Image (tube, rainbow, N blue to C red):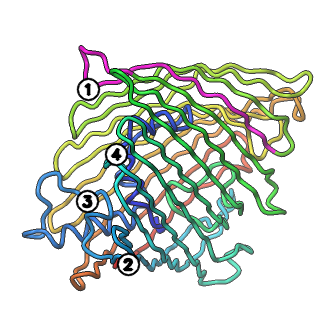
């Protein structure tokens, strides 16, 4: 709820949706999220535009999508735009340990960061950008942090070249996760609040062909857990290739084939190689409605004698719909298979949906609502844990946030927000079940 987002990424994602749809992890929903719980800075940029526009209302679809539209900020170098962002939040957390025996706490969260960008991914030539945000968590009772470091850091950067017919994009990110995060999209069902260093890298290349695109992507992620957390490190390496064409009878759609292959390596478990051929499809009805989907069949092999290789249907999809200039919806669905961080020799098959709604209300108020559900079924790979543990989780998340912009000066904008999050995990292994209610108020500034 309080981590600062990257408007650059949101804007680029809208412009390069056909490219990034092939980069996304197979089996995860690919849909632009206009109301991410990391959207504090994006909401501030929008609020700045709202307050500056005639009559304090945005005309039509003129919702801000990037730093180039913001009122504040300053330029360090020609064409390099920088925005400085900060926020202060008061929070009540009913289950700070996310465990079956709840332990409540009150705390303050202080966020600070900077977002910079130069160039536009939709224009020919080079572009780059980066953002940093840090957070400090101060618990009313120091014992409620349970030894967690109060500071967290997140950095991401990107650079790309748009040559017209050929486009290259490189993204890197790093997150020092100390387990303090209580954002809706960072509540993790399995690892919960285990501290880790998280790294990510993605390189993508797309080439325009006759009535279609050839997309290549390479990616790497690593979660390096702290000693004593009880979790083994996990890393994923993948390559992805796809070709999508626009049929003459449906010029607004793209349909094609793709294949993703790579390796999952988790400490304590043998490496798993996977290959996932898939059919991919996207359709943009208008500037207000977009759909995408991918359906594939995944083959997993475990690098150990006597292991159980597996096959599974995997899919992902999303629908983005701007019903009116003041109301937007996003719906995503997915099914994927992942090794378990906590159970050596176990995989989980995860099936879920997410619904997100954004409503502009009278008086410049904005209501953001989110609902998520995931079912996770665990199964043995036949090594280490020879007998299945039979874990089956039902994970539900619900969130509401009401925001309002603050007019301070021509360059300094602000926002206040009140929010409520509910998280519940029901598990056949009671030790992994928890209920959690989070409420709070936040004040944010952007320059």
Q: Nearer the viewer, mark 2 or mark 3?
A: 3
**Mark carried by residue 62:** none
| Residue 444 horizontal/vertical position (percent) | 37, 77
Describe residue 416's horizontal placement relative to residue 216 as left or right. left
Q: Are marks 1 and 3 in contact (CB under 8 Å)?
A: no
- Image vertical order of residue 420 relative to residue 113, above or below: above
Q: Does residue 295 show up magenta in the picture?
A: no
Q: Nearer the viewer, residue 84 or 107?
A: 84
Circle 2 is placed at which residue position?
Answer: 443
Circle 3 is placed at which residue position?
Answer: 64
| Residue 101 horizontal/vertical position (percent) | 69, 61
Whichever of callouts 2 and 4 sits on the residue coming sooner in the sequence is 4
Circle 1 is placed at which residue position?
Answer: 252
Looking at the rendered structure, the secondary structure element under dot 4 is helix
Neighbor class of circle 1 (other Cα within 10 Å; few <14, some 14-19, many 20+) is some
Looking at the rendered structure, the secondary structure element under dot 3 is loop
Please report the residue visible at 51 percent of the width from the left and 54 percent of the height from the top: 185
Q: Are marks 2 and 3 in contact (CB under 8 Å)?
A: no
Please, which residue is most extreme toward the right here? 305
Looking at the rendered structure, the secondary structure element under dot 2 is strand
Looking at the rendered structure, the secondary structure element under dot 1 is loop
**Mark carried by residue 14:** 4
Q: CA distance from mark 1 to mark 2?
A: 42 Å
Whichever of callouts 2 and 3 sits on the residue coming sooner in the sequence is 3
Please report the residue visible at 41 percent of the width from the left and 56 percent of the height from the top: 127
């Amino acid at each position: 709820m309080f981590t600062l987002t990257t408007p650059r990424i949101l804007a680029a994602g809208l412009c390069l949706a056909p490219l990034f749809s092939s980069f996304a992890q197979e089996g995860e929903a690919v849909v632009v999220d206009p109301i991410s719980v990391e959207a504090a800075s994006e909401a501030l940029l929008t609020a700045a535009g709202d307050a500056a526009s005639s009559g304090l209302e945005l005309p039509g679809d003129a919702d801000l999508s990037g730093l180039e539209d913001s009122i504040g900020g300053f330029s360090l170098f020609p064409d390099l735009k920088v925005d400085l962002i900060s926020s202060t939040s008061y929070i009540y957390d009913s289950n700070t340990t996310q465990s079956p025996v709840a332990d409540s706490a009150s705390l303050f969260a202080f966020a600070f960061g900077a977002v910079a960008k130069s160039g536009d991914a939709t224009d020919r030539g080079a572009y780059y950008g980066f953002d940093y945000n840090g957070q400090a968590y101060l618990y009313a009772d120091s014992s409620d942090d349970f030894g967690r470091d109060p500071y967290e850091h997140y950095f991401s950067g990107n650079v790309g070249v748009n040559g017209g017919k050929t486009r290259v994009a490189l993204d890197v990110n790093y997150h020092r996760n100390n387990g303090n995060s209580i954002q809706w999209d960072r509540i993790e069902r399995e690892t919960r609040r285990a501290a880790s260093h998280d790294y990510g890298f993605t390189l993508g290349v797309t080439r325009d062909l006759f009535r279609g695109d050839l997309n290549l992507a390479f990616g790497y992620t690593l979660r390096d857990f702290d000693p004593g957390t009880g979790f083994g490190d996990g890393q994923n390496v993948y390559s992805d290739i796809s070709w999508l064409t626009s049929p003459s009878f449906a010029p607004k759609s793209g349909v094609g084939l793709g294949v993703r292959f790579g390796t999952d390596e988790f400490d304590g478990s043998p490496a798993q190689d996977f290959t996932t051929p898939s059919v991919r499809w996207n359709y943009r009805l208008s500037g207000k409605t977009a759909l995408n989907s991918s359906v594939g069949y995944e083959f997993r092999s475990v690098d150990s004698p006597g292991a159980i290789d597996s096959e599974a249907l995997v899919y992902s999809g999303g629908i983005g719909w701007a019903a009116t200039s003041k109301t937007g919806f996003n719906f995503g669905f997915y099914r994927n298979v992942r090794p378990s961080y906590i159970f050596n020799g176990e995989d989980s098959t995860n099936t879920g949906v997410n619904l997100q709604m954004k409503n502009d209300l009278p008086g410049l108020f904005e209501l953001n609502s989110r609902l998520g559900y995931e079912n996770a079924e665990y199964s043995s790979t036949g090594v280490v844990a020879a007998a299945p543990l039979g874990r089956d989780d039902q994970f539900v998340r619900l969130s509401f946030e009401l925001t309002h912009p603050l007019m301070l000066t021509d360059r300094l904008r602000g926002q206040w927000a009140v929010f409520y999050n509910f998280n519940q995990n029901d598990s056949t292994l009671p030790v992994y079940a928890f209920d959690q209610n989070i409420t709070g108020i936040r004040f944010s500034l952007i320059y």
